[in-house]
Every structure is written in structure tokens, then in C-alpha cells.
Amino acid sequence: MMLNLRIEMKRENFICMLLWVRPQPPPPPPPQQDQPPPRPHENNQITTVRLQPPQHRLFEASNFLGHNLVGPSRNGAIHATLSDPEVLDCPICCEPLTIPVFQVHWEPKFAKFILQCENGHTACSSCCRKLQHKCPSCAMPIGYNRCRAIEKVLESLKIPCSNRSYGCKESICYSKKYEHDRSCSHAPCTCPLPACNFQGSSRHLYLHCRSEHLCDLTTFRFSTTFPLFFMVDRKFRVLQEDKGVLFILNNRLECLGNMITISCMGPSSSKQGYFYELTAKAEGSNVRFQSSTRNIQTRVDHPPSMGFLLVPNDFLGTRGGFTLDICIWRLGSNPAVSSALGSSIQCK
């Protein structure tokens, strides 16, 4: 597995890292007779680097004392190849090694240092505390000697977002990879319909469902109430809005009745919110529920974690189902509804 990276660092920091990893670098090759002798390093030049597989775990520079240099800028970027992406992960918890985060009051969950034992094995600070400062690789004690050379590398590494194929063009620090992935607006969504393995951005999923599963969709418009007959044993329905948004109407059968919720297919970091209202009617009675939607990337069949509409068993008709009146708004488009801070249920 190959991973292309961009490293941004000042040359003097990089030379310190090289000396820390390989105190005695090999001398440059002697110049040939038909070539001028290699020029010494200039302050505004940087070096090509390759990170070797885990059995070596050291950096090699290409003629770092010679003339084979790239990049005219002192603070420019150089391209490197990381043949083992896990080489910069903590060998214990397998999470990316992160640089320190300093606060006025130090809290372990916000600050992680890279520590090493006398043999040079690294570990993040949280794993260090769990192991009582004893190296799991060689049983040597781990002190508080921080690996500042590796910290410099982590500060410099820039990698493309893992959602690049879904439209994200950002390059982020390696230590912030998981943090960015959780908040990326291009996080992929999976098709909720059975026997379909499509995966893509929320926009591409909308286009996919419209072209491949149109007969399985229920179309509607925002701020417009529409009826929907729902069989008691059907687990979900896919609702398609004209403006490019998909919603999932989830149904879970319980002993007291049916638990109904609506979720929006989209990344959890999406700033666009929606509000919905469900109304179930029976002879002389109705039950109504209002709530905001929760964003999901894949449909799962589990009890709802938020509020839900409970349709009692005596609301079921002779056809083995019930009718719902549904209305979905964009938050802010209907002040009377959007001003509600929580869920509400009304029974008549």
C-alpha cells in the first residue's frame, strides 16, 4: 500500500531530524572527472525524502549533502512516499501519533506526547500511562524524553482527505486525519435499498437513487404535507425531495406499536438542518410528533436514540397498516415550527 504525502518543513529542522535518525550519514560519492564537484548546501534548498518499510523505519535522504536537490524555496514542499502508512501510528493503540496540545490546565485527553524508551521505541502518552511507563516492545522504562524530531515530521506531513474520491480536495495534517474524517462534509453515504452496494457522496447518492431506484422512492416537496400509507411490518421508506435531499422514514415494530422516525441521508457535519412533523390518525383520535432530523450515512435497524412517534396498535387499519401525514421543513423556513427547541407529541 502506497501513500503519497507532502512534507512542509524548514531545512534546518529536517537536517536535525536526519542527524537524530542517522548520526553518521554516508559521504557523498566522489565527483567524476567530467563533472564539477558537488556544491555545498544552500540555505534555500530542500531535500527529497523516502520513508522506508517498517523493518527499517528510518529516513534516507537523496544526496542530502550533494547537488541532487529539489525545490527553490526555503519553506517549500517536498514530495515523499510512505510505503507503510502505519509507521507513524502508535504501535500500541494504532492511532496516529499526535503533536502536543498545550493548554493552561493540562488534560490527558487533549494532550498527547510522543515518548520513547532507551531503545528508541515510541508510544503516545495515553498508552504510556496505561502501561505504567514500561515499553511493551523491550520492557525498558519509558521516560519523558519527547521525540521532537518525529514531532517535527508530524507537524509537516500533509495527506489528502480519505474522501478525496467523493469530492473533498483538502490536505490535512496526518495527526488530524481522524478528526477531519469525522467532520468532512464529503463523507460517503451508502444506498439504503437492499441488494445495492452503491457508495458515494450525499449528492451522488441522490442522483443514483433517482436513476436506479425511482420506483422505490416517495417524492415530496419541502413545507408540503403529504399522506403515506405504511405497512406495519415494513422497516423503512425512502423519501426523495425535489431539491436533491434523501430522507429515510424508519419503522420499528414493538409490543406497544410502531416507532416512527425520519433521518436525513448526509454527512454528520452538514450544517443544513431539517424539521419534520408526523401525524397518525384513527377513528376520532390522532397522534402527532414534531422533531428535527438526524443525519446518517447508512441505514441501520436499531431503536431510535432520539424521540419518535409511537403509533398504537389500535391505530392499524383493516389492510394491516396505517396512514401518516408527513411534512418536512428546512430549519428556519417555518418560524412557527423551527422555533421549537425539542420534540413534541400531541394526542387528541
Image (cartoon, grey):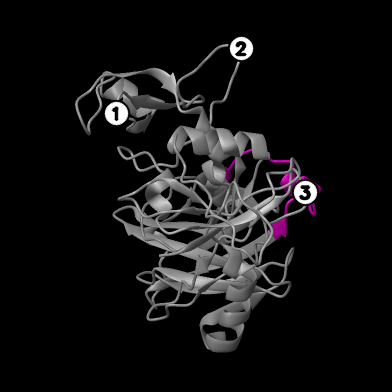
Residue where numbered disc 3 is placed: 73
Give the amino acid at mark 3: Ser
Residue where numbered disc 1 is placed: 119
- Relative placement, left or right, of 163 versus 37 is left
Residue 129 coordinates in the image, percent (x, y)? 32, 21
Q: Which one is nearer the viewer's eye here, 15 or 113?
A: 15
Reply yes or no: does residue 167 show up in magenta: no
- Residue visible at 24% across and 22% down in the picture: 134
- Count of numbered tags: 3
Give the amino acid at mark 2: Val
Residue where numbered disc 2 is placed: 104
- Residue visible at 37% across and 74% down in the picture: 320
Q: Can residue 248 be seen in this snapshot?
A: yes
Of the image marks 1 and 2, the number of the one nearer the N terminus:
2
Q: Residue 168 occupies which quadrant of the picture?
A: bottom right
Reply yes or no: does residue 338 show up in magenta: yes
Residue density around tag 3, few if under 14, some if 14–19, many if 20 or more, within 10 Å: few
Query: Over which residues does the magenta segment extend?
Result: 329-348
